[in-house]
């Protein structure tokens, strides 16, 4: 893997990530294909809306259909018919989100599978083995994702465990000699600035191919998330890619690009599509609202996606209210097109040294306030 920093505008960055399976222009949003599919879309759909790289989940693919089966059938790229780069997470977030079912220890985490109820165990070494079997282009060490709020003692203990697991993961990765796969380190440290700095220092000292900022969007206030992201990104190596795990509301993408982040993922555009929400340049639309009953306009007049070229808000509302499957597909197509268009606009703005002006325009139109960009009137809810 190779990362080139092509331009900067303040802290915002425009880069290029070259992998064995393709080039990724950054900053970039990665659609989440949890079980080897971005829900309701084909790989051709993903290409059409502008997807460059997708995320798949180590935890869920381990449970079903199993990494050995995927390896036997030629790896995840062939299995899901996606020929572009794939990034896999470590499984740490899913372990955290299923905390009632887990037992955490030095060797790893024991948990009961939500698929069949069986007892399972995930160690740092197995997490690496699974990701190698999947054939992902960018992989991650097993980490502990700590809920917010947490005490200083809890955070120190969690960080120490994550760092020990990172060393074990790195050793397993190097011993397996997987070829093209890049291993990103995960920076934890909770909500404590001092521990975040320590996490950066000790993770970078291990020497990874890139760095993920973990433990965000787990219950902490938004201003704190932005402050911690800024602190962490600023301390990471300038010449390597920076990935913010799991944060993905459009205003968050803009604010975190402004803070030096290169890669993002989130279930928001796909999950919210299935709940009838469309993202637009003027803010989110909730299609079940009666005001769209007779609305002949497209979701977003400035969007050129398939959905906006062919269908009205009234029709999409009808599909959603009727629980027609086409609603989920069309809204997902649009939402991902919107997210990718937003990232492309930010890449262009950084390259033109015009990111500040872009940021101001975005927030003025989107209808929510930035902590750093003044807007007229009060902020609207995204709900």
Image (spheres, helix red, strand yellow):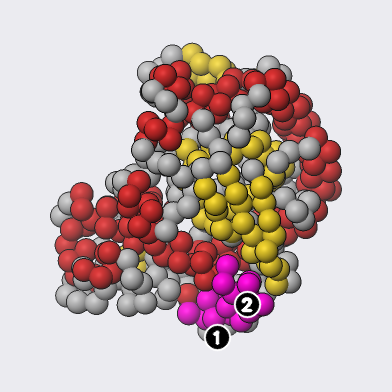
Q: Quadrant of the C terminus?
A: bottom left
Q: Residue at x 56, y 58 (%)?
A: 25
Question: Residue 190's quadrant in the figure?
Answer: top right
Q: Is residue 58 left or right of residue 123?
A: left
Q: Residues within 10 Å of mark 2 (few under 14, many from 20)?
A: few
Q: Is the residue 335 above or below the residue 169 in the image?
A: below
Q: CA distance from mark 2 to mark 1?
A: 26 Å
Q: Which residue is mark 1?
A: 376
Q: Residue at x 42, y 25 (%)?
A: 74
Question: Residue 281's quadrant in the figure?
Answer: bottom left
Badge 2 or badge 1: first in the primary sequence: 2
Q: Main secondary structure of the magenta part?
A: helix
List x then y, in percent, for residue 151: 75, 40
Q: Residues within 10 Å of mark 1 (few under 14, many from 20)?
A: few
**Front-most of 36 and 325?**
36
Residue 355, magenta (yes or no): yes
Q: Is residue 382 left or right of residue 209?
A: left
Q: Is the residue 9 above or below the residue 106 in the image?
A: below
List x then y, in percent, for residue 246: 55, 48
Q: Quadrant of the N terminus?
A: top right
Q: Residue at x 52, y 48 (%)?
A: 22
Residue 279, magenta (yes or no): no
Range shown magenta:
347-365
Q: Which residue is mark 2?
A: 352
Mark 2 vs mark 1: give the one in front.
2
């Amino acid at each position: 893997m190779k990362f080139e920093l092509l331009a900067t505008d303040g802290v915002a960055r425009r880069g290029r990530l070259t992998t064995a399976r393709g080039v990724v222009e950054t900053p970039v949003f990665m659609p989440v294909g949890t079980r080897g599919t971005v829900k309701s879309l084909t790989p051709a759909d993903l290409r059409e809306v502008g997807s460059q790289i997708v995320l798949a989940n180590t935890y869920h693919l381990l449970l079903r259909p199993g990494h050995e089966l995927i390896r036997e059938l030629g790896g995840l790229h062939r299995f899901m018919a996606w020929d572009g780069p794939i990034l896999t997470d470590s499984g740490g977030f899913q372990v955290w989100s299923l905390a009632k079912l887990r037992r955490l220890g030095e060797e790893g985490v024991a948990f009961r599978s939500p698929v069949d109820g069986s007892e399972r165990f995930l160690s740092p070494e197995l997490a690496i083995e699974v990701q190698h079997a999947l054939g992902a282009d960018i992989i991650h060490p097993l980490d502990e994702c700590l809920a917010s709020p947490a005490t200083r003692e809890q955070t120190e203990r969690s960080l120490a465990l994550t760092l020990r697991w990172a060393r074990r993961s790195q050793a397993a990765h190097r011993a397996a000699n997987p070829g093209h796969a890049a291993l990103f380190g995960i920076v934890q440290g909770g909500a404590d600035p001092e521990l975040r700095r320590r996490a950066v220092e000790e993770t970078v000292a291990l020497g990874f191919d890139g760095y993920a900022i973990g433990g965000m969007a787990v219950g902490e206030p938004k201003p704190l998330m932005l402050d911690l992201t800024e602190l962490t990104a600023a301390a990471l190596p300038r010449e390597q890619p920076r990935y913010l795990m799991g944060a993905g509301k459009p205003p968050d993408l803009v604010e975190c690009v402004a803070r030096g982040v290169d890669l993002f993922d989130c279930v928001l555009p796909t999950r919210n599509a299935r709940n009838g929400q469309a993202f637009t340049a003027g803010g989110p639309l909730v299609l079940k609202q009666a005001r769209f009953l007779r609305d002949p306009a497209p979701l977003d007049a400035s969007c050129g996606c398939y959905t906006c070229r062919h269908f009205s808000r009234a029709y999409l509302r009808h599909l959603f209210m009727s629980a027609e499957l086409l609603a989920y597909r069309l809204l997902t197509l649009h939402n991902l097109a919107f997210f990718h268009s937003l990232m492309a606009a930010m890449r262009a703005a950084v390259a033109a040294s015009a990111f500040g002006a872009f940021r101001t325009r975005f927030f003025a139109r989107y209808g929510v306030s930035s902590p750093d960009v003044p807007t007229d009137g009060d902020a609207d809810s995204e709900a």
